[in-house]
Structures are given as structure tokens and as C-alpha cells.
Amino acid sequence: MLIEIREERSDDVAAVREVNRPPVGQDQESNIIDALRTNGGALLSLVGTVNGQVAGHIMYSPLTVAENVHGVALGPMAVVPEYQRQGIGTKLIEAGNRKIKDAGHTFIVVVGHAQYYPRFGSRPAIEYGIKWEWDVPDEVFMLLVLNEAKMHLDWRSIGTNFGLYLGHLCQSEPAMSAKYFSAHESNEMTRKGMNSFSCISCGSWGNLR
């Protein structure tokens, strides 16, 4: 089995939609990916192929905190069921995180499995004084710091009690609360080119060591 990780190409779009379509056949995640891509919200989109066929996908989107601190959101990420637990997801995340770091970004935010993403260095954001305003367990809202010194300086420069926004999405929707959305709300977000979450309430960066 030959696994390759590469950047998404225009002829991968249909296959990426299938990868992100759950067994029940809903198109919510696929529609969000299409909307992000169309509206310039896809900072990085990678596919994992098995013997030349797309079997996994990961997307990263830009984040902006208080207009001057820039980071990245990880997600969606998916691997087709028949190729799960064979290292494709790991390779996608490792390659994606490396590219994001090499591009000079400061941090990556992810909302996901509490036992999975810490394998790649992510830690609960609450450890850094950052809390998502929607009611989700602290352990699933995580942060991976790529440049600790820059993160510390950026956090000091903007103070406390601000919102964390997906910069390419929230310029027109600054008051939208962070959460996973219902089907109706998600469809409306897809129409506007919005990702699955938009605003995060943060505290100080004083816990960074």
C-alpha cells in the first residue's frame, strides 16, 4: 500500500467531497469545505492517497485574534472508513502542521478528540487561559503553539478578554457566537462561506511557560 500526502488539486474536488461525506450521506462537511475553498478560506488543503486514490483529506483556515494576532484552525479532517487506523490521518496532520509552522504561523486551534490530537502536541486551550464561549468540554478545544516566543509577545500586546475569530469569515459576522451549529444554521453558514465555528472567548496568555 503506497500512501502519499500532497496538496489538493482541482481534479481532487469530487473525491474530497466523498471523503468528507459520512456514511449517512449528509453533505454538511463537504459543503463547508466547498464554501471555504470558494471564499478564499482554504489556507492549506492536503489529500492522502492510497495507490493514487484519494483516501483522506485535511484543511486549514486562517484565524485572527483582535485584528493583529494570526493563527490557523485545523479542520475538517477525514479518512474514508476502509483506510482508517492505517496512519493516513497521522500523516496528514503531521504534514499539515509542519507546513503551517514552516509558513511562519504562530498557533493552530482544533476542536476534536481529546485522546487523538495531543499526540501531535495540542493541549487544552484552557491551560493557556483561553476558553471557547460555547459549552463544550475543555479537553476537546485544543491549541498547538508553533512559536512560543511570538505567541507570548502577541498575547501581551492585545491584553485580555477578547474574541478569537476566523479572520476570513467573521469580518462581516463579528457578533456570531462560537458553537457547532444546527443543520439549519450550518446551511446558512455554508451559504456565506463560513466554517463550523467562528468566535472564541479568550483570557490572558499568562499561563504560557
Image: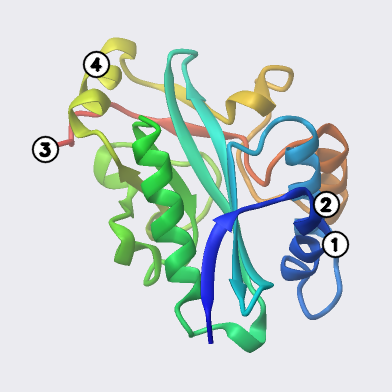
Q: Tell me the kind of residue under disc 4.
A: Arg
**Disc 1 element:** loop
Q: Earlier in the sequence, mark 3 or mark 1?
A: 1
User: In the rendered view, would you say 199 is above or below 99?
Assistant: above
171 displayed left or right of 207: right
Residue kind at label 1, given as amino acid type: Asp
- At a point 74% along the width and 37% down the height, the residue shown is 194
Q: Which residue is mark 1?
A: 27
Which label's residue is closer to the chain start, 1 or 4?
A: 1
- Residue identified by numbered label 2: 31
Q: Nearer the viewer, residue 126 or 191?
A: 191
Residue 134 shown left or right of residue 100 in the figure: right
Q: Position of residue 94 (x, y in %)?
A: 39, 59
* 184 vs 42: above or below: below
Callout in the foreground (4, 2): 2
Residue at image mark 4: 156
Query: Where does residue 81 sit, x and y in percent of width and height?
Result: 65, 84
Residue 175 in sight from this viewpoint: no
Where does residue 95 sit, x and y in percent of width and height?
Answer: 42, 56
Q: CA distance from mark 1 to mark 4?
A: 41 Å
137 and 23: which one is in front? 23
- Amino acid at pointer 2: Asn
Q: Give the Cα separation between the discs numbered 2 and 1.
A: 6 Å
Marks 2 & 3, CB-CB < 8 Å contact = no
Where, by quadrant of the figure, is residue 147 drawn? Answer: top left
